[in-house]
Image (cartoon, rainbow, N blue to C red):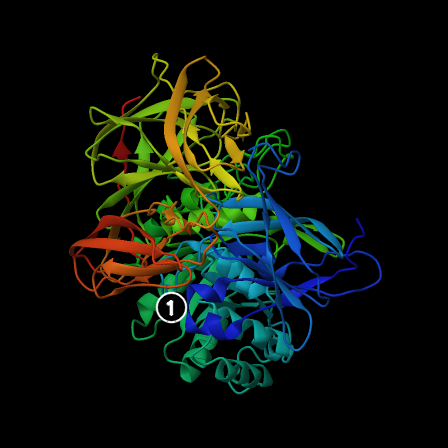
Amino acid sequence: MKRFSALFIALLLWAALEAGSAQSLGALAQVQEITGFVTDPLPNGGLFILGEPIRLYISSNPAWVRYRLTDAYGEADWTVNGAVYEGEGKVVPAQPSGSWLVLPTDALTRYGLYRLDVTTNLGEVTDLRIGLVDPVVRLGEHNSSPVGFILAIDPYRDFAVQLALLGIKWVHFDVPVDDATSVLYALQPEVQDFVDRALANDITPIFKLIGGEPPGWYDLNSNFYQNLRRVAQTYRGKVRYWIVGNEIDGCGWWRSCNFDTYVTFLRNIAQIVRSVDPQAKILAADLYQGDSPALRRMLAEEQADPSFNLFDVLSVHYLEEGDGEELGPDGCCGSIHTYRQVMGEYGISKPIWNTEALSPLVGGLHWSRNQTSYFRGGDVVPFLSPAKTIVGNRAVGAEKVFFYSYNYDQNLLDGEDGLKRTLTERALAVRALADQLQTAMYLGRLAQAPPYIEGHWYRNGLEMILVIWSNESSREAEATLKVNAEQVLLFDPLGNLYPLRTQDGKVKFRIHYEPQYVRGFTDFSEITFGDGQNDSPRFVSAPITMAVVGRRYTYLAQAYDSEPTGMPNALIPLTYSLLQRPAGMSIDALGGWIEWKPTVPGKYSVTAQASDPQGRKATQTWEITVVSAGQNVPPQILTLPRTVYGVVGAPFVYNVNAWDANGDEITYRLTQGPPWLRVDQKTGFIDGIPLRGGIFPVTVRAEDTEGAYAEQSFSLFISGSTYRPNFFLYLPICAKP
């Protein structure tokens, strides 16, 4: 086929984004005819909303469009999961010229990394990397989300939207203070534009004043401070957080290395910024030693003058666990216990943010070269393991943890190949982490686990959340959790849901190298590791039960096995087959992807089988009702809520995804629910902020254009405790080995 001469550039629907609706997150791409074939960054870093159409603008007018979405675990093998969706899109005329290619994703059920190939009668665009995620939830200023990022101002216009769609709620970047005018860098148009876009996307910006001894640092009337006032005035009400200094216990870039003069400089900065914006918060000053003359000098200053708040947050680098120093592989860094102990000696308590998290935990940037990610068949990934970095660092008491990326190395989130940026699995793992933990409160480390197993407990209202992984890529384990719940949910590192089997108050799950999230219960009695019994797999997906003659039927049959398999990092170590099927139906042996195009109305029985490596099997049997091409069938809801637990003041969200066998458009509405809950009629995105505690029945209806509908009911359990950003409690929780 003739290829498009094409360039993908960013376009956004800002009006919808400002309105905060789920539609605001439908990403747009533009294809323009140029010489040669070039794929530029897709908008929002290639992130699209699961269940909403992917929209591509092209300058020509094709007669038809077809597309393929391939679910991918790593670049080495696009079909390792077996899910390949092929469908027909719509060509919609655009104004004043060109066309929109509208590519539905409502038949898909998995979040994650996909390859997108688009074909029209005019040519094709192939090998685009996209991610399917949920709409983002707005948390507002002073939110408790642990996910922050250190970055440089990037010329990529959709950069702030990409960060927002990844669930990143805090960003900070450097503003130089080397001379009297360098601070005016913050007034450059691209900086102001980025701050405005960040705020519009619910991201809190932070300025880091970094450099050494600007002229007149001791004189509040000097040109340097006059310029700082200009910057502070420009960003009043926009930039509320200011980091001053960089690793000052090692002198940073303060040339004289005099702690007394540096603390005077810090005091002057705080005075100037607060004089312009009394609500401003000062973060000082990226320390890393735990106990140092610089920290003690700052604390002595506050102790001597309690009327002046020298700094609001202690910003630190590279937190370590334990009671001593030099615990990590880098031969650094400060223990949070030491920071708190030193502050206690002066009778002072401050929040502690880790604003440069390299993560001393196995699986962070210190991966050895032969360790891979959880993406079976994928390339070696010696980069960031998001949950290990954020969870591991929060575990030692940091209220905020920012990924350290050497001022936003594009490769941290996207692969970069010349002008082409490629979405990576690391970016999507960041988003899954934010979805699971952005409103949760940390409780403590899982104690008494095997030495290679690491786990951390969180609470989301009444609900417990366990984040757990193996620190050795070659060692897996089976865990048994005793709980008080009928349904426990496990989420993989990309946020895909696996309902676990509950028997006699126990659930079993497999622990492997990448973090998983176990939730859905409010209390537990114990967790144990190791089990000599080999249990059979269990199907966890709900079959599609309706089909229409001549239209493609698809169903992703998924089973879960809790047994260690000897296949490190493999999320789906099962093989699939069909024991009973109608003529023409097929299943992918590795991924469970079922395809069929029925030709005759009737009822057809299907039995799928999943086999584990030890030979244990599970079956799933269902009946498909096939109707004639002119007959309407009701939609089917494909999703389950991530959680039914919440807390007063914290947003509850659920992206309902329904599929219609006739291809009809679906509208959504709540037929039952509390008044604070709402649903987007076009997208099915449910959100709301609970106003009071209690148990609230909810019913959502998905209705097609003919009036046929499907309903899903559940109850929301809302804790009466008001959501408190920055709350921290350290409490080790025991387990039995």
Percent position (x, y) of residue 79? Answer: 61, 34
Residue at x 33% of width, y 51% of height: 340
Front one among 518 and 249: 518
Residues 167 and 8: in front is: 8
Left or right of 48 in this view: 477: left
Instruction: Tell me residue 280's x, y (percent).
Output: 40, 75
Residue bearing the label numbered 1: 141
Residue sitting at the far left = 694
Task: Check the image and name the residue furthest to the right.
Answer: 35
Residue 620 lies, in percent from the top left, at 38, 26
Q: Nearer the viewer, residue 154 or 273?
A: 154
Q: Is residue 246 visible?
A: no
Give left or right: position of 368 versus 458: right
Q: Nearer the viewer, residue 434 or 622?
A: 622
- Residue 413 visible in this rendered orientation of the protein: yes
Q: In this picture, is 408 found above or below 429?
A: below
Rate crowding at label 1 as few (under 14), some (14 to 19) or many (20 or more) other CA atoms within 10 Å: some
Query: Left or right: 492 with respect to 500?
Result: right
- Secondary structure state at the residue bearing disc 1: loop
In this rendering, is residue 433 above or below 688?
above
Q: Residue 704 appears in which quarter of the rendering?
A: bottom left
Q: Label 1 sits on what residue type?
A: Glu
Q: How many marks?
A: 1
Tell me the quarter of the image containing the C terminus: top left
Percent across and percent down for residue 663 are 48, 52
Task: Tell me what residue is drawn at x 63 percent, y 49 percent.
Answer: 67
Residue 612 vertical placement versus 658 (above, below): above
Identify the residue at image location x=21%, y=41%. Answer: 522
